[in-house]
Amino acid sequence: MNDTAVQGHEPSGAVFLSYASQDAAAAERMAGGVTPVSWTWRGIAYATCGDTPRAQQTLKALQDLEARQYVDPFVVADLLTALGQMDKAIRDYEKAYEDRSPNLAWAKTSRRINPSLAGNARFEAIVTRIHVPAPLAP
């Protein structure tokens, strides 16, 4: 597996998360490098495993990075969603729409989207505006 490709580590991290193995999941998510996406995965791993202080610390690092360079609001929104900060998350998903984030293509299918977004009228309005097709049935 390419150690610099975050996406290659995603499935392993998801398995670790399903067993609530926080350190292994975070390590696997971070193995792809130090990018906003990998930081988001680390924060999601912490939030999913109940380590809210470390998830908040990761969010702060992303917000500090935003002050210095562009960070896709979609990845910040993913972490906010994992932390249960839905109003802030929706604002960032809306900003991602305004910025034309390519990550919005995953709005219906990505495991990064927290199930609590299903049925959220504001989130569904974003999905409707970008015309994301429904996932194919298995």
Image: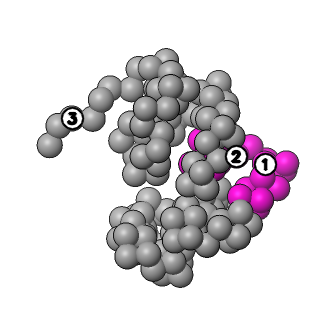
Magenta stretch? 59-80
Q: Residue at x 61, y 56 (%)?
A: 83
Q: Is-magenta flag for residue 61?
A: yes
Give the quadrant of the N terminus.
bottom left
Residue at the limit of the structure toward the right, as seen here:
67
Q: Secondary structure at mark 3?
A: loop
Mark sitting earlier along the chain (1/2) = 1
Q: Disc 1 and disc 3: Cα gap in Å? A: 35 Å
111 vs 101, left or right, is: left
Circle on res. 71: 2
Query: On the image, numbered disc 1 is attached to which residue?
Result: 66
* Viewer-nearest of discs 1 and 3: 3
> Chief secondary structure of the magenta span?
helix
- Kindly check if marks 1 and 2 are in contact, taking CB atoms under 8 A apart as contact: yes
119 vs 69, left or right, is: left
Circle on res. 136: 3
Q: Amino acid at mark 3?
A: Leu
